[in-house]
Amino acid sequence: MEKLSNFLETSKPYFAMISLQFGYAGMNIITKVSLNRGMSHYVLVVYRHAIATAVIAPFAIFFERKAQPKITFPVFMQIFVLALLGPVIDQNFYYAGLKYTSPTFSCAMSNMLPAMTFVMAVICGMEKVNMKKVRCQAKVAGTAVTVAGAMLMTLYKGPIVEMIWSKNIHPRKSYVTDTTGNGDKHWFIGSIFLIIATLAWASLFVLQNKALKTYKNHQLSLTTLVCFIGTLQAIAVTFVMEHKSSVWRIGWDMNLLAAAYAGTVTSSLSYYVQGLVMKKRGPVFATAFSPLMMIIVAIMGSFILAEKIFLGGVLGSILIVIGLYSVLWGKHKEAIENKEEIPEAIKYPQVNGINGISVIEDIEANGDELKKGDHQVNNNKLMISSVAISMPIQDQSMKANQEPKA
């Protein structure tokens, strides 16, 4: 029973991210139809995050109304930039790229996200690169292969690849962008938009990981603030880019479904869930499941939208997935090395009623004080031993002040 409980606890981040990929896949299909029917992507972003704010705010107020972090100017700027990167830059460029290309192609380009996140994490000092180690070589090589795959998809289209299940599907109307005439030009522009969107998305993951240190117990509140400020920013952008009042009209149709679905599932819910996952496993892990979305969308798109899949997209997707899992292999090896470096007391957490993890944590917490004192070596040893012996009674204030290790 204990093994089952440990398995379920370990599997939670995997189940959460896999579920999110199904949610993102549905959003891509519904949004593609809505955009091709004439809805402005600027207005869609506004409605999406207004709905997301309305959905998540009651939960934040009910569950996290106590002990709210103080919003200082640096904290406000973090939230402001998060809203600018996610709701405004990322989604406006993504929707524009989706309109000019196709759902499967957009999802494939999004697979650059882990590689871009890795580069951002290295720049910000969240990831260390030692090229003498194979795992670091794998992460760097994987990043390069991922970028090469994205460039192949952008610059080379190739012939259409027929899917076995879609040969006999001939819907009355296709919602996929026309690939004749100016289609190639639009496809290239859409590819550039998607790359910009993915870059903004990667930056969002890295900055959100830092913001979670302030809102580590208030993820719902952070999600609400990001969605609310993002809504205000998106309104300002829409007023600048759209000058017709008619674009704001929305009825009981696909446009409302796209805004409601995206706001509920892929904004409020996804921001919260990916925040919880990043808190446990880091930003690179949270971006590792995007290839699953591409597969889901490819199958759904060929069935529902009669979407055309090109050889360049297939080859580029293969390169991106190879590069992605090269990065993930490096991360896996890094996690194994970190576990091997853990002291024996942590590997055996309960020995004769003494909690080994707590022993190490409290010794580390008292380490600075021991160094500052002018005690003799024997006295230091006596103090450390007494800490270990008295560990069943834990000092919660010490543990609260400790920084989690990567």
Image: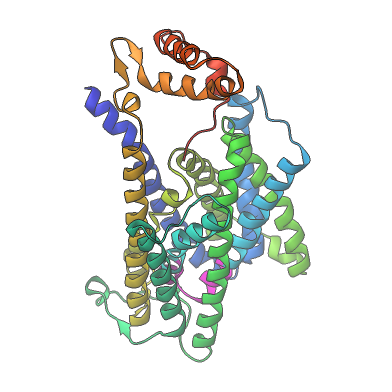
Residue 286, relative to residue 361: is it above or below? below
Estimate the x, y position of residue 191 in percent, counting from the top left.
51, 76
Q: How is the image coloured?
A: rainbow
At x 57% / y 29%, what residue is drawn?
Answer: 217
Residue 265, relative to residue 143: is it above or below? above
At x 70% / y 57%, what residue is drawn?
Answer: 234
Residue 401, relative to residue 199: is it above or below? above
At x 32% / y 21%, what residue is drawn?
Answer: 349
- Highlighted range, magenta: 94-106
Estimate the x, y position of residue 21 in percent, counting from the top left.
40, 53
Q: Is residue 323 left or right of residue 372?
A: left
Estimate the x, y position of residue 136 in percent, counting from the top left.
39, 58
* Count of numbered circles on the image: 0
Where is the N terminus found, in terms of image quarters?
top left
Estimate the x, y position of residue 182 in percent, counting from the top left.
53, 89
Find the residue positioned furthest to the front.
Answer: 376
Q: Is residue 238 left or right of residue 4?
A: right
* Res. 298 in view: no
Residue 218, relative to residue 165: is it above or below? above
Q: Is residue 50 left or right of residue 344?
A: right
The part of the image, by quadrant, that contains residue 348 is: top left
At x 45% / y 8%, what residue is drawn?
Answer: 393
Specify whether residue 104 is painted magenta: yes
Main SS, magenta residues: helix
Find the residue positioned furthest to the bottom.
Answer: 181
Specify whether residue 311 is painted magenta: no
* Res. 395 in view: yes
